Image: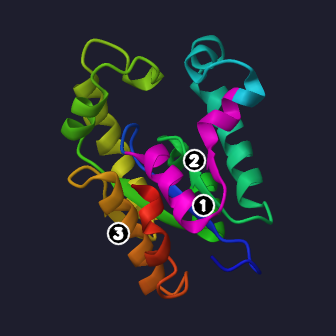
């Protein structure tokens, strides 16, 4: 990873698409910090996002999310950033992501995500009687926004973590964002 210029790599996608898992792997391969915006927000609020949603509502959460995202992308140190699934709902977030980072959309079908998250109770937007119906609704609304924001689209479900990490590394190298062979020598670290 070049040290003279801050490079930010942002991962976007539906809840459960693998943003945090892939982000941690990329962080190790590229030897740069990993930041999960939801985790940063929970630290600042001293409560879970689920609890904050319940007491303050989605709009207040989205305000905090926008603030955190802008601050992270203004940092002088390179990073891999996992965004919340709804970060792209605001035009200002889409603009700052696209302008100040290389954005990878981890694309996954609602059906695949529902299988992956069937016992996860920590995601406030997926609570209720029919999480698959909710995921389909989120996909319909958000997919065009993810595509608008992303520089690259990566299938995150039909492959394992190492395969997805390799695809992102190869894409960054092919695009000239990272030096050729930058990832190859460190891929063993993601296993």
Q: CA distance from mark 2 to mark 3?
A: 28 Å
* Picture residue at 41% right of the left edge, 49% below the top: 13
> Label 3: how many residues lie within 10 Å, few (<14), some (14-19) or many (20+)?
some
Q: Which residue is mark 3?
A: 167
> On the rendered image, what quadrant is the N terminus found in?
bottom right
| Residue 52 falls within the magenta-colored stretch | no
Please report whichever mark, 3 or 1, sits nearer to the chain's N-terminal start: 1
Query: 165 left or right of 68?
Result: left
- Which labelled disc corresponds to residue 159? none
* Residue 63 appears in the rendering: no
Q: CA distance from mark 1 to mark 2?
A: 11 Å
Residue 150 x %, y %: 45, 64
Residue 81 visible in the picture: yes
Q: Nearer the viewer, residue 157 or 98?
A: 157
Q: Earlier in the sequence, mark 2 or mark 3?
A: 2
Task: Please give the residue where the numbered disc 1 appears in the rendered image.
Answer: 97
Q: How many marks?
A: 3
Residue at point 77%, 81% (across, down): 4
| Residue hosting label 2 | 90
Q: Which of labels 2 and 3 is toward the front?
A: 3
Query: As displayed, is residue 122 above or below residue 184?
Result: above
| Residue numbers of the magenta segment | 18-42
Q: Is residue 1 above or below residue 143?
A: below
Quarter of the image where the C terminus is located = bottom left
- Relative to residue 38, is residue 11 drawn left or right? left
């Amino acid at each position: 990873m070049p040290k003279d210029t801050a490079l930010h790599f942002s991962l976007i996608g539906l809840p459960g698409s693998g943003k945090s898992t892939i982000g941690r792997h990329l962080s190790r391969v590229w030897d740069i910090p990993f930041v999960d915006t939801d985790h940063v927000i929970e630290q600042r609020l001293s409560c879970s996002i689920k609890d904050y949603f319940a007491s303050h509502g989605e709009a207040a959460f989205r305000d905090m999310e926008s603030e955190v995202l802008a601050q992270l992308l203004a940092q002088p140190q390179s990073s891999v950033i996992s965004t919340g699934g709804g970060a792209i709902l605001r035009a200002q977030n889409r603009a700052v992501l696209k302008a100040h980072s290389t954005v990878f959309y981890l694309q996954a079908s609602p059906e695949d995500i529902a299988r992956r998250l069937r016992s996860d109770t920590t995601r406030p937007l997926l609570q209720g009687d029919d999480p698959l119906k909710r995921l389909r609704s989120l996909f319909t609304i958000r997919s065009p926004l993810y595509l608008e924001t992303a520089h690259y689209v990566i299938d995150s479900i039909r492959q394992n973590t190492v395969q997805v990490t390799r695809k992102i590394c190869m894409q960054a190298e092919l695009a000239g964002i990272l030096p050729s062979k930058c990832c190859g020598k460190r891929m063993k670290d993601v296993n």
